[in-house]
Image (tube, helix red, strand yellow):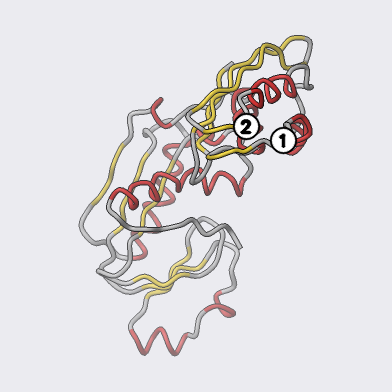
Amino acid sequence: MHGEYKVPGGKLVVVDLDVEGGALRNVRVAGDFFLEPDEAIEAIDAALEGAPANTDTAGLAARIEAALPGSTVMLGLSAEGVAIAVRRALAQATEWSDYDWQLIHEAPQSPALHMALDEVITAEVAAGLRPPTLRVWEWDSPAVIIGSFQSLRNEVDPAGVERHGVNVVRRISGGGAMFAEPSSTITYSLAVPQSLVSGLSFADSYAYLDDWVLEALADMGIKAWYQPLN
C-alpha cells in the first residue's frame, strides 16, 4: 500500500507498507523533508512496524513521538504528518495527479446561479459524471453568502441589504457568512472525489485542499497563510 501527504506549509511524506494479520508490516517512510539525526527515520519505521492497522492518526503519531530520539529535529515534517500518510495508505487514497482536472472560469454570474452551480457540480463529481473540478467564480453583483446551517434572521440585516442592493444567498456547505462583490473578491471551489481526502480528518482536509493556493501565491511573491476553521 502506498500513501502520500503534503504537510501544509511543509514537505511531502510518502509511506509504503503492507498489512498482515491486521498489523502494519514492512513500513518505509520517505519524502523530501529534513530530519536529524539520520537514525530518526529508522526509529519512525520501527515505531510503526507492528501497529494495529486500525490505529487512528493520534495513536500513530503518539507511537512515533515516543520512539524519536530526544535530539530529533524535523523540518517540513511532523509525527502527525507521517501518521496521516499512513492512514491515507490504508484508505488507498488517491492523489492530485491521479485525475484529469476540469477548470471552469466563466464570465461574471449572479450569486444565485453560483450557488446552483456549486450544488450541481458537486453532485455530478460525487456521482462520477464529471471529473474533479476547479471553478473560479466571478460575481456580477454584491452578495452576502450564508452557511447552510446559519439563521438568516441572525446573520443579515434585511433593511441594510435592500438599501445597498446586496443579494443574500445560502450555500450548500457550512461555515460563516461572507461578503463578496465584483472585482474585489477572489472565490473558487473544488469538487473532488472522496478518495482524494481519504485518511484525513474533516478539518485536515481543508488545509490539504488549500495548500496548492498558498504555493501558487508564493510563486507570485505573495505571502499568504491558511486560516484554520474557527
> What residue does disc 2 label?
82
Crowd around label 1: few <14 · some 14–19 · many ≥20 (10 Å): many
Residue type pointed to by label 1: Ala
- Front residue of 15/97: it is 15
Residue at position x 36%, y 70% from top?
180
* Among the 4 quarters of the image, the one containing residue 84: top right
- Front residue of 101/24: it is 24
Q: Quadrant of the N terminus?
A: top right
Q: Position of residue 54 (x, y in %)?
A: 76, 26
> What residue does disc 1 label?
61
Q: Is residue 19 above or below residue 194?
A: above
Contact between marks 1 and 2 (CB within 8 A): the answer is yes
Crowd around label 2: few <14 · some 14–19 · many ≥20 (10 Å): many
Q: Is residue 137 above or below residue 49?
A: below
Direction from residue 120 to residue 105 in the image, left or right: left
Marks 1 and 2 sit apart, C-alpha to C-alpha, by 7 Å
- Front residue of 3/123: it is 3
Q: Position of residue 155 (x, y in %)?
A: 55, 78
Secondary element at tag 1 = helix
Residue type pointed to by label 2: Val
Residue at position x 55%, y 27% from top?
93
Q: Is residue 37 above or below residue 190?
A: above
Q: Position of residue 163 (x, y in %)?
A: 36, 90
Q: Position of residue 14 (x, y in %)?
A: 54, 25
Direction from residue 219 to residue 125 in the image, left or right: right
* Among the 4 quarters of the image, the one containing residue 222: bottom left
Check residue 11 in the rendering and tell me which mark sits there, or answer none: none
